[in-house]
C-alpha cells in the first residue's frame, strides 16, 4: 500500500496531504513547474529589453518616411511575436500541469519519480491535454453566460478532468464527463480548494510584485530604472506562479484519488492490483465492493 495510505479523506485532510506532499517534494515540484515556465520568463524579459519606455516615446520621431514604409513589417513582426508568445505559454502550461499530475500520482501510490521522468511522460499527451484544457475552458465560459455562479459551479465539477484524462487515458469529452461523474455532490470541496489557491496566489503576487510596481512608479522619469524594475517585476511574477501553481495541481490530484476511493473503492482495487493499473468507473468494481 502507498506510504500515505488510500482512504476517504475530509477536506482538511486533503489540504494537509497537499501541503505535506509539496513540502516533502518541494524541489521536485519546483523543477517540474519552473523549467517549462523559464521559457515564458525568457520571452517576457526579452519583451522588457526591447520595449519603448515613456521617455523614449517622448522623443521626436526620426525618419518618418522610413517608418511609414516599415510599418507593415513591424506589424507583421508584432503578430509573429504574439503567436510565438501564445505557443510558448501553452507548451509551458501543459508540460508543467501534466508533469505535476504524473508526479503526484507516482508519489501518492508509493512510487518514486524525477523531474525529467514526469515531464517526458507529458510529451505523448500534449495534444490530448490541450483538447481537455480547451474544452474545459469553453465549458466554463459557456456557463458564465448564465451569470457567474453557474460558471463557478461548472469549474468546480470539472476540477478533476485533467487527472482523469492523464491517469485514465481518456479523451477530452470523456474526461469532462468523468469529472462530472466523480465530483457529483463534491462541488463545495472543490470550491474551497480553488478559493485557497487564489488566496495563496494573490498573496504571493503581492509579496513578490507590489514592491517592484512601486519602484516603477517612482522611477517613471528614468528609462533605465523603469526597464530594470519591470524586468525584476517579471521575475517576481515568475516566482509567484512557480511557487503557488503546484498547490492547485497537487490538491486536484489528491482530491481525484479521494473521490475514486469514496465512490469506486479504489483502495481495495489497488490492494488487489498493486501495479496501479486499475480500471476506472463504478461499473467495473465488483458488486460486493460497490
Image (cartoon, rainbow, N blue to C red):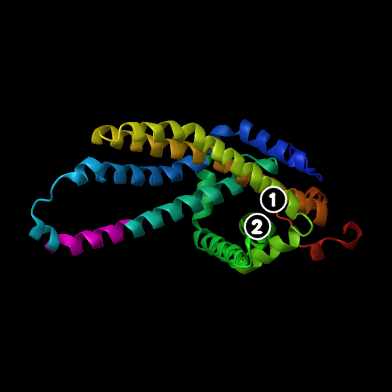
Q: Residue at x 10, y 57 (%)?
A: 64
Q: Which numbered dot is residue 87?
A: none
Between residue 49 and residue 16, name the one nearer to us: 49
Q: Which residues are magenta?
A: 69-81
Question: Quick one: quadrant of the N terminus?
Answer: top right
Q: In the orientation shown, which residue stands out farthest toward the right?
A: 288
Above-or-below relation of 135 to 26: below
**Residue 40, horizontal then vertical, whole percent:** 40, 46
Residue 228: name its quadrant.
top left
Crowdedness near tag 2: few (<14), some (14–19) or many (≥20) residues, C-alpha within 10 Å: some
Crowdedness near tag 1: few (<14), some (14–19) or many (≥20) residues, C-alpha within 10 Å: some
Q: Earlier in the sequence, mark 1 or mark 2?
A: 2
Helix, strand or loop at mark 1: helix
Left or right of 59: which side holds 115? Answer: right
Q: CA distance from mark 1 to mark 2?
A: 8 Å
**Residue 240, horizontal then vertical, whole percent:** 50, 37
Name the residue that disc number 1 marks: 191
Q: Residue at x 39, y 39 (%)?
A: 234
Between residue 180 and residue 7, name the one nearer to us: 180
Q: How many marks?
A: 2
Helix, strand or loop at mark 2: helix
Question: Quick one: quadrant of the C terminus?
Answer: bottom right
**Residue 252, horizontal then vertical, whole percent:** 66, 48
Name the residue that disc number 2 marks: 152
Between residue 120 and residue 263, name the one nearer to us: 263
The reply to whether residue 275 is visible in this rendering is no
Left or right of 66: which side holds 221? Answer: right
Amino acid at each position: 500500500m502507498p506510504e500515505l495510505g488510500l482512504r476517504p479523506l475530509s477536506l482538511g485532510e486533503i489540504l494537509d496531504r497537499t501541503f505535506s506532499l509539496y513540502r516533502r517534494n518541494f524541489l521536485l515540484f519546483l523543477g517540474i513547474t519552473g523549467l517549462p515556465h523559464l521559457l515564458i520568463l525568457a520571452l517576457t524579459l526579452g519583451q522588457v529589453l526591447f520595449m519603448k519606455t515613456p521617455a523614449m516615446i517622448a522623443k521626436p520621431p526620426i525618419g518618418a518616411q522610413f517608418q511609414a514604409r516599415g510599418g507593415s513589417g513591424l506589424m507583421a513582426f508584432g503578430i509573429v511575436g504574439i503567436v510565438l508568445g501564445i505557443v510558448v505559454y501553452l507548451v509551458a502550461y501543459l508540460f508543467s500541469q501534466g508533469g505535476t499530475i504524473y508526479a503526484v500520482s507516482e508519489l501518492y501510490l508509493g512510487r518514486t519519480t524525477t523531474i525529467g521522468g514526469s515531464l517526458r511522460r507529458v510529451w505523448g499527451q500534449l495534444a490530448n491535454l490541450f483538447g481537455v484544457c480547451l474544452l474545459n475552458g469553453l465549458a466554463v465560459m459557456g456557463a458564465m453566460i448564465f451569470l457567474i455562479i453557474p460558471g463557478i459551479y461548472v469549474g468546480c465539477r470539472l476540477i478533476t478532468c485533467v487527472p482523469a484524462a492523464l491517469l485514465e487515458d481518456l479523451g477530452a469529452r470523456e474526461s469532462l464527463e468523468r469529472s462530472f461523474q466523480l465530483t457529483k455532490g463534491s462541488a463545495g470541496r472543490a470550491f474551497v480548494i480553488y478559493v485557497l489557491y487564489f488566496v495563496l496566489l494573490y498573496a504571493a503576487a503581492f509579496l513578490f510584485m507590489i514592491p517592484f510596481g512601486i519602484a516603477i512608479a517612482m522611477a517613471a522619469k528614468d528609462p533605465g530604472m523603469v526597464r530594470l524594475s519591470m524586468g525584476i517585476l517579471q521575475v517576481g511574477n515568475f516566482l509567484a506562479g512557480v511557487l503557488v501553481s503546484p498547490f492547485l495541481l497537487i490538491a486536484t490530484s489528491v482530491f481525484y484519488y479521494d473521490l475514486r476511493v469514496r465512490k469506486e473503492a479504489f483502495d481495495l482495487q489497488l490492494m488487489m492490483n498493486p501495479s496501479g493499473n486499475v480500471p476506472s468507473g463504478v461499473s467495473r468494481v465488483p458488486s460486493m465492493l460497490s
